[in-house]
Image: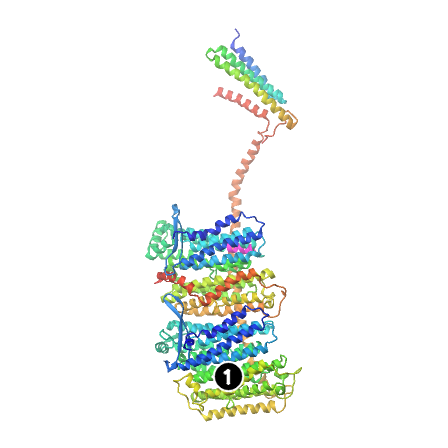
Amino acid sequence: MKWLIGHLWLIPFFPLVAAAVIAFMKKEKREAAPFFAIGAILVSFVLSCLLFLAFIGIQKTPYGHGLSVHLSHYLWFVTGTTPEIVSLILDPLTLTMLFVVTIVSSLVFIYSLGYMHEDPNIVRFFCFLSLFAASMLGLVISNHLLILFMCWELVGVSSYLLIGFWYEKPEAAAAAKKAFIVTRVGDIGFFIGLLLLYQKTGTLLLYGGSYPAIFSHETLDLLKINAVTLPLFGGVILTTILGVLLFFGAMGKSAQFPFHVWLPDAMEGPTPVSALIHAATMVAAGVFLVGRMFPLLEGSGAMPVIAWIGGITALFAATIAVAQFDIKRLLAYSTISQLGYMMMGLGLGGYVAGIFHLMTHAFFKALLFLGSGSVIHGCHGEQDMRHMGGLRKAMPVTFWTYLAGTLALAGIFPLSGFWSKDEILLEAYLHHRPLYWIGTSVAFLTAFYMFRQIFMVFFGSWRGHGQAHESPQTMLWPLRILAILAVFAGLIGTPFLFGNPFRHFLAPGHHAPDPSFFVMAVSTGVALFGIFVAYLLYGRKPLTGEDPLLSYLKGIFILLQRKYYMDELYQNTFVKGANGLARFFREVDELVIDGFLSRTGWATLVLSRFNQWCDNFFLNGGFDRACDGIKGSGGQLRRVQTGRAQDYLLIAAVGAVVLYFLSRIL
Amino acid sequence: MDFPILSLMHLFPLLAGLCYLFLPSDNKPLLRWGAFGITLIPFLFSFSLLKHFNSQNPGFQFVEKMPWIPAIRVEYFLGVDGLSLTMVFLTTLLVPLAVLASFSIEKNIKTYMFLFLLLETGTLGVFLALNFFHFFLFWEMGLIPMFFLIKIWGSEDRDAAAFKFFLYTLFGSVMMLLAFQVLFLATKTFDFTELVILSRSGLLKVSLLFWAKRVGLPFTPEVMTTIAFFLISVAFAIKVPIWPFHTWLPDAHTQAPTAGSMILAGLLLKMGVYGFLRISLPLFPDVVRTFAPFLAILALASILFGAFAAMAQTDLKRMIAYSSVNHMGYCMLGIFAVSASGGLEAKASALNGVLLQMFNHGITSAALFFMVGVLYDRAHTRDLSRFGGLRKIMPIFAGLMGISAFSSLGLPGLNGFVSEFLIFRGSFSLMTPLTLLATIGLLVTAIYLLSMLQLLFHGPLGEYASFSDVTGREIAVAAPLIFFMFFVGIHPSPLIELTNEAVVHLLKVFS
Amino acid sequence: MIPLSWYLTLAAVLFTIGLYGVLARKNAVIVLMGIEIMMNAANLNLIVFSRFLPQTRLSAQVFSLFGITIAAAEVAVGLALVIAIFKMMKTIEVEKIEQLKG
């Protein structure tokens, strides 16, 4: 088992091989492709379990704050005399992520077997899913920022491919492109952060072992002391600027305000993809990055930025979610909001709280998305909640599991969401009161919009077409398992059972803040109040026609429904600006540079014409006349040549006579 | 080395091409496979070259030197080092693929293939020659076949494009010739290695000064070297091309036949960068250093303007052509950043990145141009707005093109990323503000390439619903290129190993 | 004894008659005959000088013998040419034979 720690690469290796094998498969191999994909991810899951056991077994090789870290280094290449050492890491954070990713992936893979059963391109689907799983697993085990960035981009590509899976739909194709480009804007910041980090430290290794690394004390001290001078900002401490730059990447990936616009559109992809990538794992990669860089960020000026961006995103997205009718888009805004929550928790210094919420959120949000997929599947592709209703009877398993997920998300005691959300709110309560109140109001909104959804979808009477039906067992079993996780996973992180084992596992050195019953009571209270309001508006009498909220909020509701017009704003500024710039540079090429050239060419031509005229008139004029004279006399002389032998002879005879007389005279 | 491997590799296409001319011109399969077979031989030679090359030796290897025209001290002087080896390998790899890609040509096959063989000799000559006379001869030899390839086998506006290409490049060549005349008159040598030694010892300036005195030019040696540098560099700048000398490129690419574009983008552009590395940098380090900020701004302009201009194109091939301007801009940024003052390790990173980027861009742009050609063979149009939804009927093609496009936009795991990262990593600490601005290019590249993919492959099927997917031959052309995209992206160290020592050696001129 | 001038006058008259025939007549055969007459005038001169200048006796006679032989050959070739020309151009009028006109 110790051997396994030295061969961490095996974990992403199996899904990667599965992806490669499936890529070369024919479209008709509908049975074999899922078999490979699911088999590979299950192997990765088992390996993660074994790793956990191995890790627990040989704990106590302390690094830094009593943290246990295992590294394996590889030489990638050498430029000049600098070797580029890449490295893999096994630490509690990696293990947590490995568990989350492999469990959710396995369940989503199995679920997809049912959900995508009729899709003609199921082989390609599993290829992309496996590619995603491989790159996500690579992301969490990398100990080198460049490798992390590589996997970071690869999950982005998998996301691009999977959002655009139904590429015939123009919306899906556009959404895929938008997702990639918006996240890449953030990635540019990340990339610049890497460059700056490398310039200042000469390495991109996180934990070094015997090599120089970023998280060594010397490097961290260096980064904390030195500053760079920026225009407008003046001198900025390196950790702050680096933190902000790296956070740019996290903002793009985790759809934080103002980069959140891509995530709702990404719902154009198949629902299992939304569950796995755009709810549970990939979008959490931003949170993971902040968690991974925590030793650098801790105490830096970037932390308030992270906290505030997180808080604003949480509130902003939660308000939008209130006015959505598409079952998946609502969940997408809920995801953005919860990711903001995690960022807020991390930004306030709550490392454990943020990662804990990441984990529980992965379970219950995957559950909710898979549940919504089951609903969509049962309603023959309908996604508008106004055309659903009363599904409680038609889809009992989906209903109960969905309810479990909703309660967990709303933060009802003792489901998982309660514990993790409570830890974040506790951090906020202790360190930052304004953000605490923002967080609490988000808790209220979350409970409200989720129960609005529950009431619209599962209660009342059927408003759609055709007959809704329950989904097949391959889809229901993942729901059941995730429901169990959503209900109970929070218990590993409660202060009341075994003294919060999750915290001790993840951050042994950190002191735990004392639990506050005030915070728990308030959050439970606002959640229950949110449910109650939702019941008043949507539960008492079934939805008929317009949304009751519209009559109360009117314009504000429209504003929320249109997502604060952010898409329109971006369309009219950035997109149009970039296109305008593009056209401008094209014109510069065609008119200015080529214009200059053709003018030069034209001028040359004119000059040469003039020159030609001069030649003709002056030089050739005189020369030609002389030539004409020669030619004329030649013409005359030609006549002498009659061709008659007698004439020649006559001339010879006359010539002889003339010569005779000449000789006599001279 | 006794066995003249470089000469064989370099002259084989030309000599075999002369014999090739005697083949019957109506036997098309024989002509096609014959040309392909001929181009495979240098490829095998270059493998043996890679095998016997000593990457720890920064100097020239496999050197062949003998007098050629003693009267003007011209020598037949060939050699290969880390700077040129990857380019030689790239040449011998791309030419067979280009020939294979040209099997769809029906018009006048024999002449067409012969011109390609000529092109290969010319290109190899540029990368192998260590004597200016030799260099210039083959520099021009690369130009003429390309002119005819565009002019005879090009698309509708081929005459104007061929003419523009020819005039632009010839203008540069004339400048370069002039500069080398002056250098020869001053130093009495055409030999690159001797010129570098003269430059390093300062004698180059002295002899230029003497020459200027003798002919009565009132210039200081600094002015003389500056003039010489710019005259030579104009030729290279046009070839690269650096903004604002780039407008021949989109026209030539758009009109050239597919394989012509592959070679043009894959190899001929590299000759410009190679010229900077082999001649401009070692001969005039002081001048480059003085003007580096200015030149780097031009490189930045190539990156940004090229990317933006690509975004506004509706013609598929023009778009890829502008992306070449953009990608070569990274090379030039790296080169000029290296000329500025800064740490040696950062410079080594940037310069290794430049060399790797040359190789990578050769692979990727050749693949992209080939893909465009595949599409053009079927649709006879390059207008982006007329395609759509092709992924449904051409899934393999969509996959190949997708990989190539992602390689071009610098996706990690594929080749483009490694070299761009090395360039950025190096130049960031040498020229921070410019490098920061250059990162915008990375974003814009993603925008236009993804838009291209979207327009071609996504959405409902457009007017071309009856296309067949790629044939086995077309896959055979793309497969090696795709292989190298992955190989370099994941395991770049074999290539970096080849170049590293030469890079460190070259950087000594700046220390 | 007949004085030398008489012989020379006869030869000159013969030569002039021949020259006239060559220059003025149209028929190629007559032109040939004119040439023969001019040649015989020259032969006559040679013989006369061999009589009056003893030191040139032998060589002058040999010369004239050669001249006669060559004249015979010349007539043969000339007549053959005339026949060839007639075959080709259906005429032997020298006025019509002017292909060499410049």
Amino acid under label 1? His
Which quadrant holds residue A654? top right
SS for callout 1: helix
- Binning the other alpha carbons within 10 Å of mark 1 as few (below 14), some (14 to 19) or many (20 upward) gives many
Picture coordinates of residue B462 (x, y %)? 62, 67
Picture coordinates of residue A376 (x, y %)? 61, 81
Q: Which residue matches tag 1?
A: A361
Answer whether residue A465 is magenta in the image: no
Q: Nearer the viewer, residue A364 or C15?
A: A364
Q: Nearer the viewer, residue B337 or B44?
A: B44
Answer whether residue B165 is magenta in the image: yes
Which residue corresponds to the image point at 65% horizontal and 87% vertical from the top-left?
A461
Picture coordinates of residue B81 (x, y %)? 40, 58
In this image, A38 relative to B344: left or right? Answer: right
In this image, B237 relative to A551: left or right? Answer: left
Q: Give the answer, above or below, for where A521 lies relative to B117.
A: below
Which quadrant holds residue A233? bottom left
Which residues, given as a range, are shown in magenta? B158-166
Q: Give the answer, above or below, for where B21 lies relative to B285.
A: above
Q: Nearer the viewer, residue A205 or A28?
A: A28
Q: Quadrant of the N terminus of chain A?
A: bottom left
From this viewpoint, is residue A561 visible? no
In the rendered image, the residue lying farthest to the right is A466
